Image: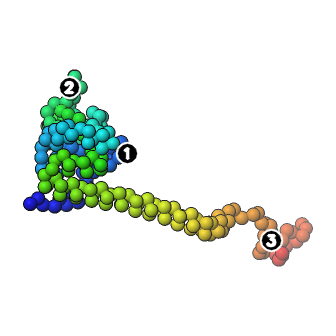
Amino acid sequence: MATRVPAERIEPQILVLRAQKVMLDADLAVLYGVPTKVLNQAVKRNRERFPADFMFQLTWDEARALRPRPLTVEDDGVASRSQSVTLAPGQNVKYRPYAFTEQGVAMLSSVLRSRRAILVNVEIMRAFVRLRTLARSVVELRRKIDGLERKYDAQFKGVFDAIRELMAPLPPRDKRRIGFRPEPPAGPGSPPGLRVK
């Protein structure tokens, strides 16, 4: 009997391409325990089950962007060797990978038909649902934070206005001097004195 695939192994394989959550053929093949070529042949034999909103082939630029290392593409535009974009160092991509949307992944269980494919598919569907729920939670949290900011910005407006008022320069004051000042001499030869103002 096939073992359950942990969510920690599935969720990192779900990528966002063309504004859709997708999984690549090579990653799915590993999870299903079949070669990528076998998975893609099963899809090609059942092409009518995989319309464009279920599956699409990556462009060379998209395939390059997914790899940490650059692809080696030959003069005719075809890269050499393997099908997977998750290759060992030194290997190159020969075929552009296929990306499967959530609906495409669900359809895969009907064309692969193995017990493992069914069990893995159930876990993949759960992973998609978890990510969707998490995305909704993030949106809800962002909305609540925005609401709190608006609420507290209004409440603290008075405090900020008071602080700005305290920081404003003071108006000019009467510059009368206080304290003792020497009195100017009364006339020639008189001793200097002090006066209080």
Give the secondary structure at mark 1. Answer: loop
Give the residue displayed 24% in from the left and 48% down from the top: 107
Q: Residue 28: percent from the left, percent from the top?
A: 20, 48
Q: Is residue 45 left or right of residue 146?
A: left
Residue 163 vertical placement versus 50 (above, below) = below
The amino acid on which the numbered mark 2 sits, given as a three-letter code, is Glu
The amino acid on which the numbered mark 3 sits, given as a three-letter code, is Pro
Give the residue displayed 23% in from the left and 35% down from the top: 96
Marks 1 and 3 sit apart, C-alpha to C-alpha, by: 85 Å
Give the secondary structure at mark 2. Answer: loop
Q: Which mark is residue 74?
A: 2
Q: Residue 34: percent from the left, percent from the top?
A: 12, 46
Q: Is residue 6 left or right of residue 182?
A: left
Q: Give the crowd class for mark 2: few <14, some 14-19, many >=20 residues within 10 Å.
A: few
Residue 15 makes an appearance in the image: no
- Quadrant of the frame with the N terminus: bottom left
Callout 3–callout 2 Cβ contact below 8 Å: no
